[in-house]
Amino acid sequence: MSDFPDDKARHKLDQLRRQEAEDSTKRASEYSHIPYVDLSVLPVEIDALKIIPEKDARAGELAAFQVAGMRLKVALRNPEKPAALAVLKDLAEHRYLCERFIASPYSLERAWDFYQRVPERHGSSAGAIELSVEKLAALRQELATLPDVRKKIEEAFFGRTSEALEVILAGALALDASDIHLEPQQQSVRLRMRLDGTLHDIANLPIKLYALLLSRLKLISELKLNIHDRSQDGRFTITLQDAAIEIRTSVLPGPDGENVVMRILNPKAIELSFRDLGLQPWVADTIEKELRRPNGLILTTGPTGSGKTTTLYTFLRAVHSTEIKIITIEDPIEYHLTGIEQTQVDTDKGYDFANGLRAIVRQDPDVILVGEIRDLETAETAMHASLTGHLVFSTLHTNDAAGTIPRLIDLGVRPAIIAPAINVAMAQRLVRRLCPACRVPTTKTSPAYAAIKAELALLPPGVPAPDEAQWTIFDAHKKGCPACGEIGYKGRIGVYEIILINDALEQLILQSAPELDIKKAAVAQGQITMRQDSLLKIIAGVTDLTEVERTVGQ
């Protein structure tokens, strides 16, 4: 006969020990006047649990199990334990109002088991929000239009703050928003979202509840909750199955409170093929030829939000192979690319574009991406790299492709370096696509039709323009439809102009010729302007004249 009890006896013994521990905990509760709680029978909220890191929770023998706004219920084994007091102090500094409960070791172990359900952190400086694919799909069905989003957010904002934030984020993802703006005013907080490059009013939120939302947002972005008079930048991650969407948070103090902008960096936004960019076929052929060259500088220009990053990342993917080494220096790294070494500017440590580029050249790269040319040192280093056997991509702030050369000269770059270093100067903008479900045909008698016809007559010789009988010109529907969220537009496409540095242009550069002469030389190459590229997309039914004039100009 065995000296050990059987399974039934062992189970009975465990029950007795558990009951003894619970009775002891109840007595401690009565003595300390702190309420008793049994977490084996009470639901543990994951949102509450993950506020305290597992390591700190186990060290302090405590667990957060319920949260409502900034009110947090915390179970402790020993309320006098120094490690527990340190955690409670930290929570108070983050403006949490903690309600304490006494719990047994068995009860706490059961709560700690739920840490397995807490999503992993993506980087040490970012929080994480779990958003299930199923929930997002359900929300997308509910949030087909902007009015739907407005209604859902207004309803959610009067519930738990964490749920309100989740609905705001889910609404932004459902509408493919690039940015979320929270702008405090005297009586309310204006919520806006940027859709396809334009801001849209979503809702007015109660000013009294905004503080809770802001604290929640600061917490997951790992910003300091007690700082209200200085700007702060942070980030967090939304986990969608295997995809991780990074949210960059910027907080800026204002007269009526702190303004917040959340930039949504969805990896799907850059998952474009080379032909998806919107380049005209003959322009795409030219760029592909230049990408096959082993050296030279390809410059893209355009304002913030014109799609330069997407274009450059697409170029990187087009040239990427296991046979070459690609290194980037960016400010900041917006999207992480597999198989490509990416570095980020850190001015506090003296790692700027110029210093970073010099270090990159010593790493034996074949292809280099420089996020932006801002000064003479960076410009000259990038050009010397292109002249010594590297293919270099970068951006520059100018209004058009022809303005690239005068801008570099203004920075102090010698024309003798510019001419042989640059392969292509490229300018771009993003125009909104017409919603194919509700776009409205334009009559041939309209002023817009006549204006488009007159301008297309000025296309350079050899540019393949469709016969007028093949034109399909549309305008956006003023009220839109459910398919486009009642906007009239859905999605964006690039419009471009390029200049190839040939022998004729090299001579003009060496003479420091004015921008007008460079434009004339580009026309002689048979290149089209952004305006002309836009018109070709208008007659193809992709966009309309109103959108082109808003984005590109007249």
Image (cartoon, helix red, strand yellow):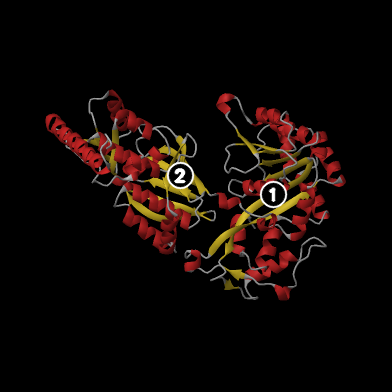
Camera-side residue: 327 or 533? 327
> Residue 217: horizontal and vertical position, in percent?
39, 42
In this orientation, does residue 412 appear?
no
> Residue 505: horizontal and vertical position, in percent?
83, 45
The residue at 61%/70% (across/down) is 474
Q: Which element is circle 1 on?
A: strand
Residue type highlighted by circle 1: Ala
Residue type highlighted by circle 2: Val
Q: Which element is circle 2 on?
A: strand
Task: Indicate which disc residue 427 carries.
Answer: 1
Q: Quadrant of residue 465?
A: bottom right
Task: Indicate which disc residue 259 carries.
Answer: none
**Crowd band around label 1 with a 10 angstrom C-alpha radius: few (<14), some (14–19), many (20+):** many
Please indicate whether residue 336 sits to the left or right of residue 241 in the image: right
**Quadrant of the rendering where the N terminus is positioned:** top left
The residue at 41%/57% (across/down) is 135
Camera-side residue: 465 or 545? 465
Task: Indicate which disc residue 261 carries.
Answer: 2
The residue at 67%/44% (across/down) is 398
> Residue 117: horizontal and vertical position, in percent?
39, 45
Instruction: Report the Cα–Cα distance between label 2 and label 1.
Output: 27 Å
In this orientation, does residue 309 appear?
yes
